[in-house]
Amino acid sequence: MNHTKGKWEAVISHKKDDYIIWAGDEGVFIATTQSVPPAAHETGIYGKQANANLIAAAPEMLSLLKRFLEAPAYKEARDNTKWTLLDEMIAVTTKAEGE
C-alpha cells in the first residue's frame, strides 16, 4: 500500500475551528477534522487539533516502526525472547499498510 509521500502537517483552517492535514511540498490534501461532527465529540477545537496532529504523524510513526522491526538487533532478540508488544507492533504496521 502506498500513501502520499512527504511530511504531513496539521494546520488550522481559515475557519479557525477545523484542522487540515496536508502532505509534501506541493500541499496535497489528506484530511480535515471537519469530517467529524462536533456533537460526536466533546473535545472541541483542542480535540480536533490532537486528532489532526495524530493523523499528521502517522507516516513518520509507520516508518519508525518498520525500521525498528527490520533492525538486526530486534530480529536476533526475537528468537530468544517473548516480545508481546513487538508482536502488536507488527500487527499494527501490517494493518497500516493495508495487508
Image (cartoon, helix red, strand yellow):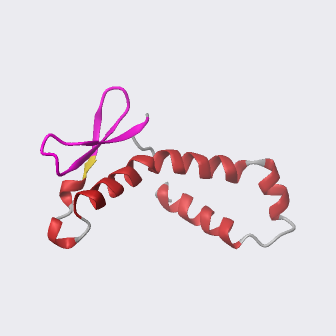
Q: Is residue 43 above or below residue 45?
A: below
Q: Quadrant of residue 11?
A: top left
Picture coordinates of residue 29, whole percent (x, y): 26, 40
In the figure, residue 80 lies in which quadrant? bottom right
Please identify the residue farthest to the top as the structure is shown.
Answer: 25
Residue depicted at x 66% and y 69%: 85
Tell me which residue sits at (61%, 63%) in the image: 89
Asked if the stretch drawn in magenta spans residue 26, the answer is yes
**Considering depth in this image, is 15 or 69 the residue closer to the camera?**
15
- Classify residue 8 by image quadrant: top left
Q: Position of residue 5 (x, y in %)?
A: 43, 36
Question: Measuring 36% from the left and 26% from the top, which residue is drawn there?
Answer: 25
Residue range (magenta): 7-30
The number of numbered badges drawn on the structure is 0
In the displayed structure, would residue 55 be above or below residue 91?
Answer: above
Coordinates of residue 49 in the picture (x, y in percent)? 30, 53
**Residue lying furthest left in this view?**
15
State the residue in front, 90 or 25.
Answer: 25
Residue 68 at x, y percent in the picture: 68, 50
